[in-house]
């Protein structure tokens, strides 16, 4: 799924989606859940802390 | 149907706009008393700056009322008598300086005038401290009340 399509699906601008991907903007939990719903992933899958070795 | 972007900001755009509005607000907020001081220093009368003072007071009430209602103090400092006493020095010095400048413009300054200036400064400091202490009491009461609620219906 493209960034543009995801942004449209969750109702935000591509600029906002890009900022989330770059780590420049922390989305609200509501938007996180909307992104998870569209992508069929869990919050932990998308926004969980990665295990550090 | 596609929503018009201009009429519908997403959460990040909304936050950015709020931040820009915040900058604008604070510039206007402090520009008003600065304009009052400059006008008073350049021969203006209180009557001539009444409009600016009223707008400044309305802005202050609009900011202070909801802040106290929501149990919010400033970002920079914790509410305390010591802090309030320190902050009150600023308007006292400003009012004292204005008083001295006006005295100098009106034909010089003597010992008695300096004594009056000191009195004016002390009164301004005490007045500001009293007002800030009243706000602090209201804030602490409200803070305690908000912290005691179980969260139902509150954000």
Image: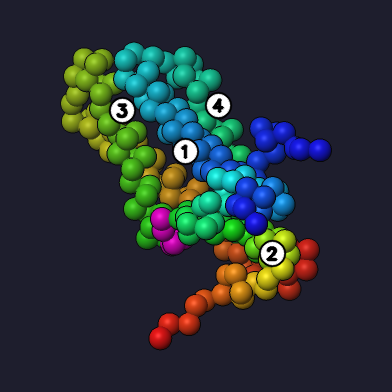
For disc 2, the neighbor class at 10 Å (few under 14, some 14 to 19, many from 20) is: few
Q: Report, in whole angstroms, how far the alpha carbon at label 2 lies from the one at label 4.
A: 54 Å
Please tell me whether mark 1 sits on a helix, a strand or a loop: helix
Q: Report, in whole angstroms, how far the alpha carbon at label 3 lies from the one at label 4.
A: 19 Å
> Magenta span: helix, strand or loop, mainly?
loop
Q: What segment is highlighted magenta in the picture? A: B76-80
Q: Report, in whole angstroms, how far the alpha carbon at label 3 lies from the one at label 2.
A: 64 Å
Report if the CB atoms under discs 2 and 4 are less than 8 Å apart.
no
Q: Chain of mark 2?
A: A
Q: Which residue is mark 2?
A: A39
Q: Chain of mark 4?
A: B
Q: Which residue is mark 1?
A: B23
Report if the CB atoms under discs 1 and 3 are less than 8 Å apart.
no
Relative to A11, does residue B5 appear above or below in the rendering? above
Q: Which residue is mark 3?
A: B98
Report if the CB atoms under discs 3 and 2 are less than 8 Å apart.
no
Would you say residue B108 sits in the magenta stretch?
no
Q: Which residue is mark 4?
A: B54
Please tell me whether mark 2 sits on a helix, a strand or a loop: helix
Q: Chain of mark 3?
A: B
Q: Residue at x 24, y 16 (%)?
A: B105
- Measured from the top left, where is residue B26 in percent x and y? 46, 37
Which dot marks residue A44? none
User: Is B45 on the left-hand or right-hand side of A49?
Assistant: left
Q: Residue at x 22, y 32 (%)?
A: B114
């Amino acid at each position: 799924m493209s960034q543009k399509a995801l942004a449209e699906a969750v109702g935000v601008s591509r600029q906002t989606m890009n900022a989330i991907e770059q780590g420049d903007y922390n989305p609200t939990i509501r938007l996180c859940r909307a992104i998870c719903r569209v992508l069929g992933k869990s919050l932990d899958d998308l926004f969980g802390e990665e295990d550090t070795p | 149907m596609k929503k018009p972007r201009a009429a519908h900001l997403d959460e990040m755009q909304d936050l950015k706009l709020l931040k820009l509005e915040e900058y604008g607000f604070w510039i206007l907020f402090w520009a008003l008393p600065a304009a009052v001081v400059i006008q008073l220093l350049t021969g203006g009368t209180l009557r001539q700056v009444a409009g600016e003072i009223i707008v400044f007071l309305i802005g202050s009430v609009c900011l202070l009322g909801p802040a106290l209602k929501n149990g919010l103090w400033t970002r920079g400092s914790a509410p305390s008598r010591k802090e309030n006493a320190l902050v009150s020095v600023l308007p006292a010095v400003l009012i004292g300086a204005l008083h001295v400048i006006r005295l100098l413009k009106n034909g010089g300054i003597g010992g008695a005038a300096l004594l009056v200036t000191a009195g004016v400064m002390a009164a301004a400091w005490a007045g500001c401290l009293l007002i800030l202490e009243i706000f602090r009491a209201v804030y602490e009461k409200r803070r305690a009340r908000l912290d005691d609620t179980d969260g139902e219906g509150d954000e």
